[in-house]
Amino acid sequence: MEKARNRYPDFEKTRDRAARVIAPLKPADIRSNAPEDMLFVAKRTDASGDLPEPYLVYFMLVDLLDFKDLGWWEKLAYSIPVDFNGTAYLVEHRKFGLGLFAADPEAQEDDAKAIVHLIRKAVKAAQPYFEHLANEAAEGSRLNLRNHSRALYDRYIYFRKIFRENIERRRSTRNRSTPSAYPACRTAGPLNARPAPVLFRRQPRHIAKPVSPSKKNLRCPAFSDTGCAGSRVQSASSLAMSSCSPTETVTSVASPVTSMADTVP
């Protein structure tokens, strides 16, 4: 990295800009307030999810601003102790990703959010230096590529499986024999073709319905061909007030209305 610094003409300018942006965050020292077992008891803060990419944070803090890296350990890529307002924190890239660690995360969550905000601003200010490092790596064939082929292949397998399941389901539905109420069609056409059902026309209303034999002896005016002045339609009041029986011949119909003179004593 020392050679990359020397070949970058605006190194000091970019470094000063990032240092002004990240203040008051600075490297931790013996005056920073921290427990003795800070490296073992520090816990991840909730603000860790807003940190930039791990390699950008490392290049900005260690390579550009000369923060100290404690080195790698089991399930640990790097550990950078920082000081914010006299309290020590750890910026570490662990097994579950980059995070900001504190001795008491719940009580120090507000300071953790402020630290993450400063780191993001400093990374943005150091963008020209990152581009210089990328160009140097491309010219020297020193690149780290992320291989996403496994994830893409798993997606392909997943959608291919769903496609084949849908094809098999449609084939089984097409070949399934279903009972039919119609005779099999013998004409040319699809295998499961059904003949169109026969639609019967309704009987016209002007055709009179046949009279059952049991009603031939009915001579009530309601069923008489000449009742009600030759009309076939009898009013509902006449039907309700008629008192004829099916076996007797009705010669007259009594008036259902009784005069008031007959009812008054």
Image (spheres, helix red, strand yellow):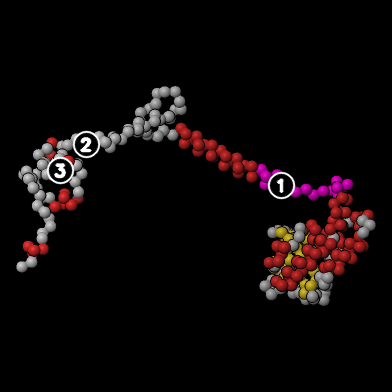
Callout in the foreground (2, 1): 2
Q: Which residues are magenta?
A: 137-154
Q: Which residue carries the number 1 mark?
A: 148
Marks 3 and 1, how far apart in space? 97 Å
Q: Which residue carries the number 3 mark?
A: 227
Name the N-terminal-most of marks 3 and 1.
1
Q: Secondary structure at mark 2?
A: loop
Where residue 177 sits in the image (x, y, percent)? 41, 33
Name the N-terminal-most of marks 3 and 2.
2
Where residue 240 sits in the image (x, y, percent)? 16, 52
Q: Is residue 115 magenta?
A: no
Q: Secondary structure at mark 3?
A: helix
The correct choice, above or below, for 230 with respect to 81 in the image is above
Viewed as shown, does residue 103 lie left or right of 13?
A: left
Residue closer to the observer: 109 or 43: 109
Marks counted in the figure total 3
Marks 3 and 2, how far apart in space? 18 Å
Q: Is residue 143 magenta?
A: yes
Residue pictured at 47% horizontal, 36% vertical: 173
Callout in the foreground (3, 1): 3
Q: The disc labelled 2 sits on which kind of residue?
A: Lys
